[in-house]
Amino acid sequence: MKKKIEETMRVSIFEVFEKMFYIFLEPLDDESNEYDMEAAISFEGFLSGEVRLLLSMDIANTMIQNMLGLEKDEITRQIIEDCSKEAINMICGNFLGKLDSTKVFKLSIPSFIEGGSRPGPLNSMNQNQSSASAGMNFTGIETGKNAYKMDFDSDEGRIGVIIAAND
Amino acid sequence: MSFNVLIVDDSNTMRAVIKKVIAISGFKMAQCIEAGNGKKALEVLTDNRVDVIVSDINMPEMDGFELLKNLKGEDLFKNIPVILISTESSEKRMQDAFDLGAKGFIKKPFTPEAVKKILNEVIGESNEEEDRRDDEGFDF
């Protein structure tokens, strides 16, 4: 299941970034913690959990410029928040649809924070997950067997995605 | 021929995105009208001629499914085709939408090409239905 979750999530992330933001991502071997903001959404169904999207300010600005055609000086904090929430909503919805289109999932309203550390339900995950973010303090996430972190690079900057799922 | 499109979404940003995508898709859009939820969409419809509605599902006050139900009950609006747009695209969710009268379903993420294709299909169907009704209306 872990492999399927990781692979499905990777495909979903690529699809959302290419179709909506015209950004082409490459998987990053090194782990990155250099992010400025985070959007999160939780889901319930046959699989329950949470997905978090970590963004640098540079890539957030590029996403908005590409998606809305705005100039950098026209971008407001509200637009950054809306865009980040929409991105995590699309990634999670796309991921769940690909995982099993016959099942219905309930998605929460996305949340958004800039910088800082988010104490959250993800820190209740168990241990023994190699790709989880050991030592990452941005989100307060500890390693867990069902928590995965993926980092991606692009010409416009880096993104990170964390998924924690309990099946 | 160009068409008036009503975009219903509680996110200003998403409304702007949908509007931009429709514009760059090449779909013949005359006027783009916006509403923040289903309730506001019904208000907008009383003052504007709308050819097609593109609506989000999850919205406060009145969601996309409720909007479909309300449109169905109004003689003036029941023939306006509605396309729902959502990240939640399970087979059941889509079937629920079609059962309530939606004419199309756009899954997010979407491309301008996909949006144009669905709009043209729905508008085409709608025009054919209207032609049929016009034909049936004359008794020679």
Image (spheres, coloured by chain):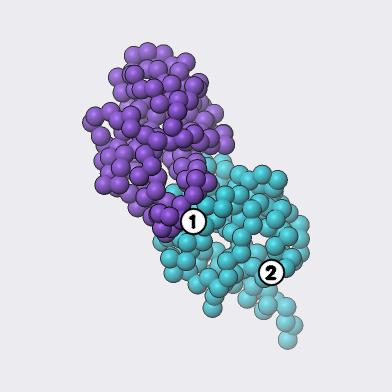
For the view shown, which residue lies furthest in the front direction?
A: A73
Relative vertical location of residue B137 with respect to residue B56 in this rendering, above or below:
below
Relative vertical location of residue A114 with respect to residue A47 in this rendering, above or below:
below
Circle number at residue B83: none
Chain A, colour shown: purple
| Residue A115, quarter of the rendered image | top left
Q: Which residue is mark 1?
A: B17
Circle number at residue B48: 2
Asked whether residue A164 is in view, the answer is no
Residue in the picture at 37% in, 13% down:
A127
Asked whether residue A120 is in view, the answer is yes
Q: Which chain is cyan?
A: B
- Residue type of the residue flagged with mark 1: Val
Circles 1 and 2: CB distance less than 8 Å? no
Callout 2 environment at 10 Å: few (<14), some (14 to 19), or many (20+)?
Answer: few
Judged from the image, the secondary structure of the residue bearing numbered disc 1 is helix
Residue in the picture at 25% in, 34% down:
A28
Judged from the image, the secondary structure of the residue bearing numbered disc 2 is loop
Residue in the picture at 40% in, 54% down:
A72
Q: Which quarter of the figure is the N terminus of chain A placed in?
A: top left
